[in-house]
Amino acid sequence: MSGLYQIPALFLTAFCHAVVAYHMAEHKYSEKKFKIYGCIYIACFVSISGYGYVAGGTAGILSYAGIVLCTFLFSCIVSQDCFLKKCFLFITYFCLFSVLDNVLKLMIHLLLPQLSGAAGYYAAIVLRSAALLFLLVLYKRYAAEFLCFLTDRSRRWWNLALTALLFYLLQAAVSVLNARNVMPDVYLLLTFATISFIMCVVYGVVFSNISYMKRDAEAALVRQNAEYLSNRLSVLQNAEEANRRLRHDMRHHIDVIAEYAKIGDTAAILAYIGEYSTEISEAAVKRYSENRTINSILSAYADKARESGIDFLIRCNVPKELKVREIDLIALLGNLLENALHGCQESGKENKSIEIHIRLQNKRLIILCNNTCLDDLELADGLPAKKSIGISSILSVCRKYDGNLDYKIENETCSACAVLNL
């Protein structure tokens, strides 16, 4: 079969790789720019593969290495995930690709020996592409959210990448045996099936552990929410007690004002009313937002900032109901303010401040948090170089709602902007 005859199959394979790369990774570029890179990748893939089929021999082996490298570079360029996550996703995908390719070719050869070489080749290509796209749907539905939870846990990504590499090397070794016709086709098929089964079991255990850690983190957020609400309840109770005391003392205040009025001391009356007005203002409960969850979080951190001597400015304009889960709001806004509070406390500056701006605009929830920070705070790819678990949690929420998170440092102020598409 000539290399020219295989070109349509090569286009289908390259297109499948591009679709998987687009949906598996966190997008780095717009859809239009991705299509441009995708077209360049498909052209390179078809050119290298076509040359390998025509040349054969050593050139064929080198062309295979070339398309692997080309696919890996393409997946790295279009994704903004961390490098180790890119490695894990690519190795896992390529391992599945190779296993499916070998298994389907063996099954067609064993079960449909009457098919011609060209028909069997195209049947394997079509079935392999369909299987990979089906696995992609399963990944998006069940696994993608769990992997977002491990955003900056580099040690775990090392473990996952090495696990994927181990399975790839196993199936690669079997592929070499298949190419050299060392084992009967039935035994090769059983070997590939065994490797695939073990791989599924191991990955099932891995994702189960990640799921457990995610549920544990969400439980911690629920406890954090309870703390916010408890703090808010305490503030309300104290305010209610102060208001009750003021109402109880109202008769005494009126008597005092009446005595001043009898002697015509207008200045004393005005001074007394001013003092009383100040006391009422301090006892009043401040409401920062119509949304109960946002109001609770803002109230809690306004108190913390005041206790730490930090100026706290709030500008919030959101409706009572938002299409955001309460636990996600806590993870996002709570961690933003917690990081801002710590940033102010660690800055060592005399004048410290936090500004939080929250608004809903064109179905997008925009949260901008500015805070005094350390002079040597460094950023990498729009995020603090030393990312905490809190930032990972914020980033996970932003990605869940197809939004973004961006940090900037200017004039000794760290600005974090989180956007959620609702």
Image (cartoon, rainbow, N blue to C red):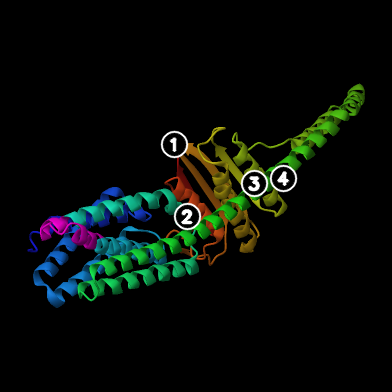
Q: Is residue 163 above or below residue 286?
A: below
Mark 2, other Cα within 10 Å: few <14 / some 14–19 / many ≥20? some
For the C terminus, give its image quadrant. Answer: top left
Which quadrant is the N terminus positioned in? Answer: bottom left
Say which amino acid is labelled 3: Asn
Q: Earlier in the sequence, mark 3 or mark 1?
A: 3
Q: Is residue 151 visible?
A: no
Residue 351 is one of the magenta-drawn residues: no
Residue at 9% in and 72% down: 55
Task: Tell me which amino acid carries mark 2.
Answer: Phe
Q: Earlier in the sequence, mark 2 or mark 3?
A: 2
Instruction: Identify the mark at residue 363; answer none if there is no mark.
Output: 1
Name the one closer to the observer, 135 or 332. Answer: 135
Q: Amino acid at mark 1?
A: Lys
Number of the front mark, 2 or 4: 2
Q: Residue 301: horizontal and vertical position, in percent?
A: 65, 48
Residue contact between numbered discs 4 and 3, judged by CB atoms under 8 Å: no
Residue 249 placement: quadrant: top right
User: Does residue 23 lie above or below 273 as drawn?
Assistant: below
Residue 2's spot in the image, x, y percent? 7, 63
Instruction: Using the numbered discs, state the Cα–Cα distance from disc 1 to disc 2 in whole angstroms.
Output: 26 Å
The circle on residue 231 is: 4
**SS class, disc 4:** helix
Disc nearer the start of the sequence (2/4):
2
The magenta segment: 104-122
Q: Which mark is residue 146?
A: 2
Q: Tell me the distance, in whole angstroms, between the alpha carbons under discs 2 and 3.
A: 22 Å
